[in-house]
Amino acid sequence: MLAGSVGCRLVDHDRLTDMLIQVGSALEPNEAWLALRGLKTFPLRMARQCESAFRVAHFLEGHPTVARVRYPGLPSHPDQQTARRLLPDGRFGAMLSFDLVDCDTAKAFRFRDALRLVLSATTLGDVYSIMVNPARTTHRWLDAERQAVLGIGPGTFRMSVGIEGVEDLLEDLDQALRACQAS
């Protein structure tokens, strides 16, 4: 289920109201119940996901087949000091991205297909670890030149780290990275 809140500037209020009339602005009872139930364990899940994402980012940054990792908790991230100021508890989120070394589309598919635990999906954010290849999914309509301007290449992956055992995630990523290099 998906839920949230929407806010806007006063000048956009009429447009927002029109949209809410068209798409609806209230959760169905079952979705509301699911949201309330999920909120009870959210702090535990988020803490686990942040801790695991931090470890995954460190692992990937040290892997010889990974060219670059983007995660605000890493010292190599250009905005790490800002992230530390805004997130003083040291939890930098469950999302990260990384680029494989010398990766073409075929190699990217080999990597993705070799994953056993991490799921391939076009949406991110769940209790399961999910990965997406933006060049082939979320940004597929852009040509390679525009993708490159945005920092997206054939070997760019975005990952939402779930609540699985972090050692299992690291093992899965390592075996998939080795598998895509071996072919």
Image (spheres, grey):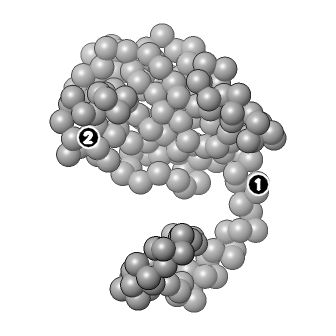
| Neighbourhood count class around disc 1 (C-alpha, 10 Å): few under 14, some 14–19, many 20 upward | few
Three-letter residue code for mark 1: Leu
Three-letter residue code for mark 2: Arg
The CA span between labels 2 and 1 is 33 Å
Q: Secondary structure at mark 1?
A: helix
Residue name at image x 53 percent, y 36 percent: 96
Residue position for label 2? 136
The mark that comes first in sequence, 2 or 1, is 1
Residue name at image x 54 percent, y 70 percent: 9
Residue name at image x 21 percent, y 28 percent: 145
* Foreground of the two, 21 or 116: 21
Q: Secondary structure at mark 2?
A: helix
* Foreground of the two, 144 or 108: 144
The answer to whether residue 8 of the structure is visible from this angle is yes
Is residue 25 shown above or below 47? below
Is residue 14 shown above or below 134? below
| Neighbourhood count class around disc 2 (C-alpha, 10 Å): few under 14, some 14–19, many 20 upward | some
The quarter of the picture where residue 115 lies is top left
Residue position for label 1? 44
Quadrant in which the C terminus is drawn: top left
Going by the image, does 177 lie left or right of 146? Answer: right
Q: What x and y, as percent, mark residue 64? A: 48, 10
Q: Residue furthest right?
A: 89
Is residue 85 shown above or below 174? below
